[in-house]
Amino acid sequence: MKFFLFLIALVFNVALIVALNTGFSPIPPLGFFLSPTQGFWQNAENVNDTPDDDISMEGLKSEVSVIYDSALVPHVFAENDHDLYFAQGYVTAKHRLWQMEFQTHFAAGRISEIVGEKALPLDREARRKGMALAAEKGVEMMLSDEKMNEVVNAYSDGINAYISSLSKAELPLEYKLLDYEPEEWKPIKSAFLLKYMANNLSIHNSDFEYTNARKVFGEEVFNFLYPNAHSAVEPIVDKTGKWDFMPDTVATPKVRPFVLEELQKNPFVDEPDIRNGSNNWAVSGSKTKSGNPILCGDPHLGLNLPSIWFAMQLTAPGINVKGATLPGSPNVIIGFNDNVAWSVTNALRDVVDWYKIEYKDADRAAYLMDGEWKATETRIEEIKLKGAPTFYDTLMVTEWGPVMYDASYPAKSDENAYAIRWIAHDPSLEVKTFYLLNRAENYKDYREALKYYDCPAQNFAFASTEGDVAIVVQGKFPVKWKEQGKFLMDGSKSSGKWQEYIPMEQNVFSLNPARGFVSSANQDPVDSTYPYYVYSQSYETYRNRRINYLLDSLQDITVEDMMMMQNDNFNTIASDNLPFMLKQIKDKLSSDEEIEIYNLLASWDYINDIDAVAAAYFEEWYDAIPSLIWDEIRMKKSNLDYPNRFHTMEILRTDTTNQFLDIKSTSEKEDAKAIVNLAFKEGIKNVKEHLSKTGLKTAVWADYKSTSVTHLARLPAFSEEPIMIGGNHNIINATSGTHGASWRIIVELDKAGPIAKGIYPGGQSGNPGSPYYINYISKWASGEYLPFNLIKKDSDLENKLGVLTLDSKN
């Protein structure tokens, strides 16, 4: 068992593991941690352990059966909604309690309570960002809806029933290692969990960087460097000029309230990973061998243990659904029922704007608005520190939103004040979307469910047994004039406000398109004929084209075809650029080594498979190009972004003598050929350095990339690495070092019953001492799937682990 392989190192190096690798925690009390009756020994599990049990508890109305299959996937059968969500909370906590609580502590800015003062900057950032404000409004909306009130309270009660049943010896291992105990679960924790996902998927922006670039280069050059769209756009929905509505006009102010007087500093300490994205598609029966629609989805997120998702079936009168749940939130988030299936990808729309605030004085009690001083709202954030006195932070809130950064928050040496306007701060009811989707029977039900979904904006792909396939770019989107929110705005002018929102029925959507499929991979949602201004600095330009090419090409599609497609390792970046790059160096090769690497790359098939050596050399070569081209940006002592990678390579290929290709620090005048040759040599050097540093003998791609699935608290003993898998960012199999397909699902919508496959990089258990902690990883890495069909309560499963029965004491 993996747990005991780490036993000796864990005991004698616990201080190093926790203090050095997390950078946070003091040494836990080793007496308790090593206690034979209460310590970590109690967390070891045997593969032969079964979940068979019959437990009576208060809070249930009737009996609930939880049937576990051989992969530890629970299938919950209840007689009413209340008991269904009570049991979902109980069972999820049974397997993922520490993860649920740690993630909500992170979102709430409470990690310092667990690990001490070193986490204070992290907690202050969460508080300043308005995560608590957002969660408070979210839970208020949940509890104001009668049905959602029942759902989230039943779910919380189930979690608390499990927590109250635990002895100290039965606490999850991380509580013992970090020396704390779980607290009562309240509905606001579920709201925090949803805002945690909103933060990961919608907070990224370049307002400060673009403001600086416009100041440094001027408007004309800025527009060249950072265009609103790119030539390779294959939008999610292509209805060129065929929109049957017109928006209410939103006038551009005569004086646009952009801040340009001085270079600005981005207040963010650590933004979410820009690679957070996903693939999904739904294929019409006209293109499948069976004549049934097939839906596929794989959200791309950080690869963590315990796993982001927890697989589960929920069955009660009116609901029979299975899929991926988020530990800490009720319902199935991505999945299917007897009639429909759905999956999501990140829509990447710009729903974060920044406003520069002018305070009246150092007291921060008032700020300037249209020539008058307006009172700020004061919010005292109490941040408890383990082993130290409580820290109190005073957060000022304006009509724009919280002032995340000012002179009182010294993460950066900037005296300016900046307020953040983020759609996640608005009241919303996403939990109802998933409640209704779990029960949906057709396209009409799907569209009705999406009405309640605001943030983070997602592309909801859909398929049904009635034969429909559809996609909706769903979220609450402000109506903006062109470039509104692309730059830092003047918070003293109300003309910078969001005036209204795009009506839900006018959000981008497609139903049963003529091409026979819908798809999304985080690309532009529409072309320029869509009546509203749409923008993101991060739209994808590679995976979506490969997906559409394959779906266009395939006929008589089967589930097996879709499994192969989700694991496709074709590198579109390389196929776009490598022929040009090779042409530039062909007559400049100066050594046998360079000739050998040139020949290796020239014969490469552009596939980033596990054993592809060329992939590593291409990656280093490609990655060396931007810093050579954008030396004008790199050398500036200001906060600037490099232009989009697609645009960078397009300039290199099509404008080979562009002024930016000249490296200012040299006496020569470089062009595209010179840049590509310099980058080639730099890439070879970087490969050598990487091999020397890691001890690898060859640049075999899977070894070179070194994918890992890391523990949430960054504990190496509870992480898994290296994992032999191909792919990379911008490839359909978007698996890089610590990021990739966090869940893969394929569902064929047969009227006799859906046929489903699923897998994710981890396991159902959150306990590092369990055989079900990482048991899916090898299958996930090799492109295998688990059967994932719905089962019936009286199913005679050959692979049944056991049955947990929850009885009412009443």
Image (tube, rainbow, N blue to C red):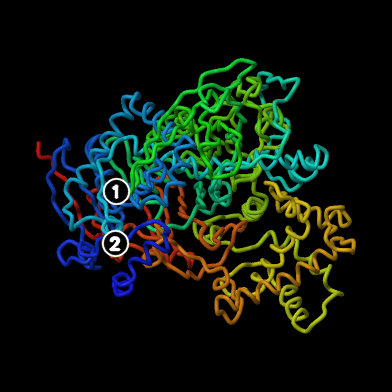
Q: Is residue 459 above or below residue 149?
A: below
Measure the alpha-carbon separation of dots 1 and 2: 17 Å
Residue 154 appears at what percent x and percent y?
25, 35
Residue 479 appears at what percent x and percent y?
63, 26
Check disc 1 and report the residue beneath it. 92
Left/right placement of residue 317 relative to residue 728 reads left
- Kindly identify which numbered label has been placed on residue 509: none
Q: Nearer the viewer, residue 743 or 411?
A: 411
The secondary structure type at the circle numbered 1 is helix
Residue occupying image coordinates x 61% and y 67%: 608
Position of the C terminus by quadrant: top left
Mark sitting earlier along the chain (1/2): 2
Frontmost of labels 1 and 2 is 1
Label 1: few (<14), some (14–19) or many (≥20) C-alpha neighbours in 10 Å:
many
Left/right placement of residue 313 relative to residue 719 reads left
Residue 462 appears at what percent x and percent y?
50, 41
Check disc 2 and report the residue beneath it. 70
Residue occupying image coordinates x 68% and y 59%: 572
